[in-house]
Image (tube, helix red, strand yellow):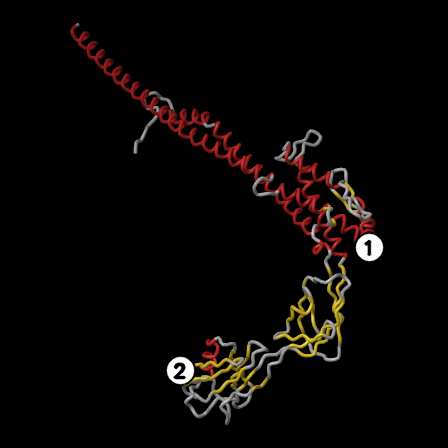
Amino acid sequence: MTITFSGMATGLDSSAIVSELMSLERRPLVRLEADKTLLKDRLDSYSQFNSKLTDLLAVVDKLDSSGDFRPNSINVTEPDLFSASGVPDGRSGSSYQIEVLNLAQVQKNVTSGFSDRSADQFGSGSLSVTVDGTAYNITINSGSGSLEGIMTAVNESNIGVTASIINDGTATPYRLVLTGSDAAAPFNVDATALSNGTLLTSGSATIPINQMATMAHIRVDNIDIYSANNSITDALPGITLDLLKAEPGTTAAVNINLDKTAVREQINSFVTSYNDAVAFVTGQSVINGSGGGILSGDSGLSSIKRHLQNMLTTRINSSGSINYLSQLGLETRRDGTLQINDNILDSALNDNFKDVEKLLVGESGVPGIASRFKDYLGSQTSSADGLFAQRKESTDSSLRRINNRIAQTEIRLNHREKAMNARFAALEQLISGMNAQSNFLGQQMNMLNNLITGNK
């Protein structure tokens, strides 16, 4: 490492001088870094706007589908018997009569009680388990002939039967419980092959059935339907029935009704998302001479806002009597955002729902207003050539150019700084040499002067 003591010969603080000069030289770099920050901030704002357009697209996508636009509610008249959930495929106004005759339950086999769950009292050998007609042999190794060992062997066999141990609180409390996994798959267990004469049951080689497997049984509009579990998905189109209680002779109705409240919420969501997008563009504008947002003056944003506003007033030439969004109570404020006239919207939904659907969803050969919004927003949010995609490509290109300029400038400035330091070092060396010569000449003059004075 080279240690430099600046100014020892000249008296100049060359390090400070070079630092100040380089600070001036680096001013272009400061401007380039500021340009980078501005570009990144603008890109972030484009991304925010793209998210708002994407949110609006998601809303109009639902309005463009009859299935989504016509949300149905499910009502069960006897909710203690079963619950119903899902997205009904049936038409609004559909009704089904359902009787729950039997709940599904799996088979359970339970042994007699034993005083110790971990004692090796049953010996080794195998259990023969037949599940739905298929026989399996489960090996019980030497030293594992306890309730716990047999439970582990059954659970590790993965044959559709699980084992557990319960404590019934009696003098011989521990019982092995074998449970089937499917109500449609009965099973039996034979413990004859175990080496110990004391089998898993008292006086029998077969573990007795404590609970028989039974299928769930319901009757839908007098049609009998069976299921291996209590969650039935095939009885009603698009609806899952979860059975809670069997009560033969009691019939519950499942009614499918149009949920107009959900439709109204969809229209409210459209207005909210539309307003978010328009307000963002408005917020970028210069108003009354005051500075706008970071995207002020961007023609792309203004063009999208104008197009969205124009689509609001588009006439839909459907066969219905409602042809404009204004007939649904959507009114434009002075700032370009929308508000809903609740009375007009409620009246349209209650008295003329089919024509509301024709306006928003469309009909054969006539795309609805939602479809028009969907197509336009899809093009503007495209990851290939949408507004954000274009601006990102342009921004990335600009950032690459700036980074290259910064790198080149840094190289030039490093050379410049080294050259300055070298010149000051040379100056120090020159002045130091001149000072040495001056001192030498001064000494010689003094000696000469002393000789002349001494001769006198």
Residue at 65% over, 49% down: 58
Quarter of the picture holding the C terminus:
top left
Q: Is residue 104 left or right of residue 407?
A: right
Residue at 72% over, 52% down: 266
Q: Eyeballing the image, is 430 above or below 68?
A: above
Q: Few, some or many C-alpha atoms within 10 Å of disc 2 (few <14, some 14-19, many ≥20)?
A: some
- The kind of residue on which mark 2 rests is Asn
Measured as percent of width and height from the top left, residue 124 is found at: 40, 86
Quarter of the picture holding the N terminus:
top left
**Viewer can see residue 3:** yes
Measured as percent of width and height from the top left, residue 82 is found at: 70, 72
Residue 141 - label: 2
> Dot 2: what SS?
loop
Number of on-image labels = 2
Nearer to us: label 2 or label 1? 1
Q: Eyeballing the image, is 419 above or below 444?
A: below
> Dot 1: what SS?
helix
- The kind of residue on which mark 1 rests is Asn
Q: Is residue 129 left or right of residue 86?
A: left
Pointer 1 residue: 350
Q: Few, some or many C-alpha atoms within 10 Å of disc 1 (few <14, some 14-19, many ≥20)?
A: few
